[in-house]
Amino acid sequence: MKMTNLKVLLTAINAKYIHSNLAVYSLRAFAEQYRQSVEIAEYTINQQIDEILMDIYRRKPDVLCFSCYLWNIIYVGQIVREIKKVLPETDIWLGGPEVSYNAADVLTQYPQVKGIMRGEGEETFLELLKYYHGDVGGLDRIDGITYRNQEQNTLVEMPMRPVLDLNRIPFVYEEMEHFRNKIIYYESSRGCPFSCSYCLSSIDKCLRFRDLELVKRELQFFIDYEVPQVKFVDRTFNCRHDHAIAVWTYLAEHDKGKTNFHFEVAADLLNEEEIRLIRSLRPGLIQLEIGVQSTNPQTIREIRRTMRFDQVRDVVGRIRAGGNVHQHLDLIAGLPFEDYESFRKSFCDVYALRPEQLQLGFLKVLKGSYMQEMMNEYELVCQDRPPYEVLSTKWLSYSDIIRLKGVEEMVEVYYNSRQFENTLEILEQAFPNAFKMFEALSEYYEKNGLSGINHTRISRYEILSAFAKEHDSKRTGLYRRMLTLDLYLRENVKNRPEFAGELTVTKEEAAAFYDAEEKTHRYLIGYEAYDKRQMRKMTHLERIGGKLLLFDYLNRSPLTNQARVIDVSGAEA
């Protein structure tokens, strides 16, 4: 086949506007010789289907390719069904993890689709472009695809393509203007050394690394452009120690104080050298995501996971003590041999580590995974629609799932937001454990008709205040002080909420404090260019627990975004 003036559209439908899709940019970069034929269109799942449909129609591609994932496959399916009606001559191709392992089923479900690119797509996409430009004979010469033979009315599945040398993939971020205000995704390796039964990464056992000198040059590009955040998509970044050490050392030596780098790591694989290096880094330079998933040993064995929680506990605690690294720990509800009580223990075990974020996720039964093969044995029931989330198992009823959903929401609102840190620490003491606290808070929301409402931030404080009063009425004053502390740690609110009570610092006291500019500047860092009126707007004075506290909003924690707090009680003299 040969098309003149070929126009190919690589399409990504992202979960959020701030996300970018590494896959489509990597495909286009690899096919540099045909770059003039290839356009990229990025949308989000928050846009109306008609809006996306109209934009694609206006572009009028000859070949339309979609990058398919759990979070967007429903939207892709709807667009595919409609776009063929208005662009009947356009060939539609799909690729990505959501369609790679059941390509024939997808083609049967969507007769509008010409074919599927399976697995790694760079070389396959290049071969497709050669086909449409007339530079290769036919689709039956392209490995890594499943396609529809219209003449014979059959589906043809070509062999899988050998894995790609990562050093052959060009750097995709040369034109940074397009990625302004977006999270950058970057990979220095592909594949995974582990075989977790719920994950598709374990299928690709060929673990490959990008050359370190190449990686360093590309990281320097991000540093020089002062990109806010770069997320490594390597499945287990620290599975090769020399690689991890080299990258973290380079970041430490070339850091300009602007860019944050996110890594997924196995905490129990971190060695002494890596821990020492991590603890020496600038606060906020890196953040770590650590998948614990469960602390039930039987569950860990059954899901074919390698994880020693005693070592995870030790490593996470040591890194936390350094006070310089944001740690994000994950749990998965719905795994085999984990009932409600077992999950409660897993939650409490991980919560006790006090990570900056604790994500309570739910098992997703991915097509092609070992977990899917074991559904009957586990009596595992999941949704038919993406993301194929667990509904019940032999060990966990749907009622249990609903209760855990409530706990998940409360953890997200009250713990992961880092807006109620001091209040929660006190409130926990009124319950047997943290899980019971979030469980009771969820029940309070349900009982009082508070669920399903888009509450303001101040409303969340007021609800927590009322909840604390109901469960621990003897310490109402303490909760009021802690809520006030948490509130002002985040922002200098204009209207003082009811739970904060009357002003603890009079206007006259505040004026006297800021009038003594020389004394005030002893406490504040970076305010030399501001006069006392500006300083008053950028800070807040509050008397809490007998101390006069100065909240400094110019200098915030890179881990929690909380204002710096200085005890200035001595300044009153």
Image (spheres, grey):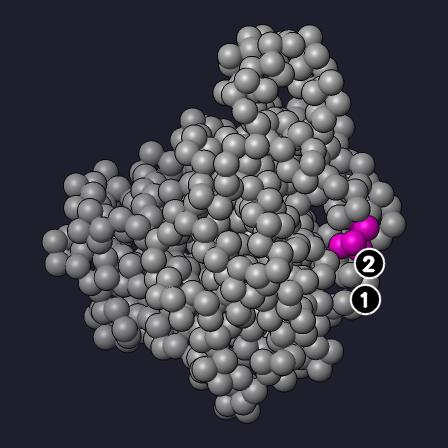
Secondary element under disc 2, as helix, strand or loop, is: helix
Q: Which residue is mark 2?
A: 314
* Of the pair 351 and 244, the residue shown nearer to us: 351
The majority secondary structure of the magenta stretch comes to helix
Secondary element under disc 1, as helix, strand or loop, is: helix
Q: The magenta stretch spans which residues? A: 315-319
Q: Is residue 167 visible?
A: no
Q: Residue at x 57, y 61 (%)?
A: 473
Q: Residue at x 45, y 82 (%)?
A: 399
The image quarter in which residue 141 lies: bottom left
* Of the pair 4 and 551, the residue shown nearer to us: 551
In the rendered picture of this protein, how many numbered marks are placed on residues?
2
Q: Residues within 10 Å of mark 1 (few under 14, many from 20)?
A: few
Q: Residue at x 27, y 73 (%)?
A: 109
Q: Position of residue 535 (x, y in %)?
A: 55, 16
For marks 2 and 1, give the CA distance.
6 Å
Q: Position of residue 503 (x, y in %)?
A: 52, 32
- Left or right, 218 with respect to 97, comes to right
* Of the pair 291 and 314, the residue shown nearer to us: 314
Q: Which residue is mark 1?
A: 310
Q: Position of residue 323 (x, y in %)?
A: 74, 41
- Left or right, 31 with respect to 532, comes to left
Amino acid type of the residue tagged 2 in the rendering: Asp
* Of the pair 498 and 156, the residue shown nearer to us: 498
Q: Residue at x 35, y 53 (%)?
A: 454
Q: Residues within 10 Å of mark 2 (few under 14, many from 20)?
A: some
For the residues labelled 2 and 1, say whether their Cβ atoms are less than 8 Å apart.
yes
